[in-house]
Image (cartoon, grey):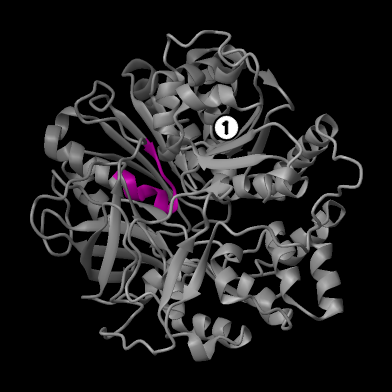
């Protein structure tokens, strides 16, 4: 965008994002402000040198998710470390105005802790708040967007009043294309011959620190009559150089199925050039400076890009409709598409996309006149994001895997498949791919250190453990239990409260628990919610085991781990623990709540939900 068209001092948008949500929102803020002709730059937090850069901007907008135990995401930790340096003067940012927006989940005690810390630090360094901090909540009826769009509208209105457009200059309309961040370009009309048996299974997008292993076993561990397919996937990790710890995760990059790619190619009229070689070209001095991968998949064709890079099954965001409106000559389609870009039609957008989980592919099939040029595909369609899964096996200790190999990597995966309100079956992009894997298939993984479990050398690790883990949340608890048993045996006291629907339907790792109970390594309490007329959940077990839990937690100083699905479960668990503290400690409710908060502050209450 030509500098002569920009009407404000410099605005910087920073983001720290673990799995992509905050990054996507940062781009949406950027595009919205660009349409107001404001002078904007957007960059990943770690890519900025704060000491030399921050004071040179007039307005700073920081979007951050919260990860782990209230922490800054990985791509913002370097920035945060520098931002905390004590020698920075308290008036360092006195000429800067700022605001922040957080992506969080209110079922966590440290709800939006990352963005709150960032916001407070800006205030400490003298920056003035241009609009109030926004806090998105996954538990909102409209998800993060329920808070994001009102916050964004307030921000745009405030900045527009501060920096009004000159007479005769209007905002850039939604159906006018902005310069791309990067684009795809055909490099030849000669068809590529793939030197692979299966370009979906045998080809992997390069990622930093990725390792390629083989699937050893992919076993359904729920009864065939059960409504949900849950897989215990074992991955062979040869040798002893690969290490992980309890609480660590592996990230897997999903792939689109070839039949979906064929449908996309057909609806966009791109089938004839699907196997021609491509190049990924970055626009000079882009406004959004998100890092591109250092290496791209080879051969790079439209087919491999659609299988391995672009999320054609994502639920489209509002900005998507503004872009595709440029690629139709059908006036009725264009008007309908542009309605979804208007703030007053936010409810209609939610009802059309999020509630029925309608995908980008389905939107393009419905608005069949839309034809996205190949050079704009990477600009219009979001990239596939890695998915994280907790490791369910011990690495340095004993793990009773089916192959008796010390280094088997195991994960427990609930396959996402359901019917929407429009009675259409939806499947999770990543779990659908995982369910298709067979023994011997290659799989590319990246190990990530987790924060759920303290390091084995710390005092916290060696305290008694109370593990509350319904469903697949039990996976990291299994890794932790086997590790503790191997290292300390009887000396460490372990309590597991596990919940599922039925003893004979989805009682994961029941043989493991039986072995540990027989050897007096584990105290197990179970809640089978559907095995009796009245439903029983983990919170009911907590109340029933009040005496034991009071002794473990208060008298012995146990660490409490809560792991599983977000929503009602973590809230109910906290409420049940507060009741235990009230009853056994003879405390007022406020004292019990304060004790739980103190436990969290000293690392004795640790939660990981999704």
User: Depth check: 355 or 252 in front?
Assistant: 252
Magenta stretch bounds: 467-477
Left or right placement of residue 156 versus residue 536 in this view: right
Q: Residues within 10 Å of mark 1 (few under 14, many from 20)?
A: many
Image height of 433 relative to 549, above or below: below
Residue found at the far front of this picture:
4
Examine the rendering and report whether any part of residue 389 can be seen.
yes
Dominant secondary structure of the magenta stretch? helix
Quadrant location of residue 275? Answer: bottom left
Seen in the picture, residue 210 relative to 440 is either above or below; the reply is above
User: Is residue 415 visible to the viewer in this orientation of the structure?
Assistant: no
x then y, percent, for residue 223: 40, 71
Answer left or right for 361 relative to 324: left
Q: Residue furthest left?
A: 239
Q: Nearer the viewer, residue 69 or 286?
A: 286
Q: Residue placed at 44% from the left, 72% from the top?
A: 305
Task: Check disc 1 and report its element: helix, strand or loop.
Answer: loop
Residue receiving disc 1: 112
Asked whether, in this view, residue 193 is left or right of residue 176, the answer is left
Question: Which is nearer the eye, 39 or 501?
Answer: 39
Position in image of residue 564 (x %, y %): 46, 47
**Residue 475: in magenta span:** yes
Q: Number of callouts in the render?
A: 1
Residue sitting at x 68%, y 44%: 3
Write the residue at 45% across / 59% down: 502
Q: Position of residue 387 (x, y in %)?
A: 42, 56
Farthest-out residue, right: 167
Question: Does the magenta portion include 51?
Answer: no
Residues 403 and 186: in front is 186
Percent coordinates x, y for residue 38 in the rendering: 73, 41
Q: Residue at x 22, y 56 (%)?
A: 409
């Amino acid at each position: 965008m030509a500098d002569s068209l920009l009407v404000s001092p410099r605005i910087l948008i920073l983001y720290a994002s673990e799995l992509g949500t905050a990054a996507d929102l940062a781009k949406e803020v950027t595009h919205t402000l660009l349409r107001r002709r404001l002078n904007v730059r957007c960059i990943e937090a770690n890519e900025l040198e704060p000491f030399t850069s921050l004071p040179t901007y007039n307005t700073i907008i920081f979007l951050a998710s919260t990860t782990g135990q209230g922490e800054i995401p990985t791509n913002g930790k370097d920035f945060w470390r520098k931002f905390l340096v004590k020698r920075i003067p308290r008036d360092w940012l006195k000429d800067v105005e700022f605001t922040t927006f957080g992506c969080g989940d209110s079922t966590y005690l440290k709800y939006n802790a990352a963005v709150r810390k960032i916001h407070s630090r800006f205030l400490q360094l003298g920056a003035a708040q241009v609009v109030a901090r926004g806090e998105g909540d996954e538990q909102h009826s409209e998800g993060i967007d329920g808070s994001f769009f009102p916050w964004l509208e307030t921000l745009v209105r405030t900045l527009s009043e501060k920096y009004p457009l000159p007479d005769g200059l209007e905002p850039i309309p939604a159906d006018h294309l902005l310069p791309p961040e990067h684009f795809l370009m055909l490099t030849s009309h000669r068809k590529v011959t793939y030197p692979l048996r299966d370009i979906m299974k045998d080809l992997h997008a390069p990622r930093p620190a990725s390792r390629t292993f083989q699937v050893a076993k992919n076993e359904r561990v729920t009864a065939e009559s059960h409504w949900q397919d849950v897989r215990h996937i074992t991955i062979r990790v040869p040798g002893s150089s690969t290490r992980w710890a309890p609480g660590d995760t592996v990230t897997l990059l999903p792939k689109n199925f070839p039949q979906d790619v064929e449908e996309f190619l057909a609806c966009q009229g791109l089938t004839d050039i699907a196997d021609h070689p491509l190049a990924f070209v970055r626009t000079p001095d882009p406004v959004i400076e998100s890092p591109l991968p250092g290496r791209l998949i080879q051969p790079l064709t439209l087919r491999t890009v659609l299988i391995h890079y672009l999320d054609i099954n994502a639920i489209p965001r509002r900005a998507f409709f503004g872009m595709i409106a440029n690629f139709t000559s059908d006036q009725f389609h264009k008007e309908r598409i542009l309605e979804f870009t208007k703030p007053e039609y936010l409810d209609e957008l939610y009802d059309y996309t999020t509630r029925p989980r309608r995908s980008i592919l389905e939107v393009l099939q419905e608005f069949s006149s839309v034809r996205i040029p190949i050079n704009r595909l990477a600009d219009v369609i979001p990239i596939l994001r890695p998915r994280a899964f907790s490791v369910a096996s011990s690495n340095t200790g004993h793990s009773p895997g089916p192959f008796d190999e010390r280094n088997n990597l195991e994960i427990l995966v609930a396959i996402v498949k359901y019917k929407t309100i429009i009675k259409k079956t939806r499947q999770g992009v990543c779990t659908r791919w995982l369910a298709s894997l067979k023994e011997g298939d290659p799989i590319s993984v990246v190990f990530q250190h987790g924060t759920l479990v303290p390091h084995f050398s710390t005092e916290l690790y060696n305290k008694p453990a109370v593990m509350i883990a319904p469903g697949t949340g039990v996976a990291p608890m299994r890794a932790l239990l086997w590790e503790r048993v191997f290292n300390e045996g009887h000396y460490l006291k372990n309590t597991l409260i596990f919940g599922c629907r039925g003893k004979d339907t989805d009682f994961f790792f029941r043989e493991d628990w039986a072995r540990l109970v027989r050897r007096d390594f584990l105290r197990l309490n179970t809640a089978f919610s559907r095995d009796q007329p009245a439903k029983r959940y983990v919170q009911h077990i907590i109340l029933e085991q009040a005496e034991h839990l009071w002794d473990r937690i208060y008298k012995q100083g146990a660490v409490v781990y809560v792991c599983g699905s977000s929503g009602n479960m973590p809230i109910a668990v906290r409420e049940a623990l507060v009741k235990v503290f009230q009853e056994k400690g003879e405390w007022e409710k406020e004292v019990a709540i304060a004790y739980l908060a103190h436990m969290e502050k000293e690392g004795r209450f640790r939660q990981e939900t999704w």
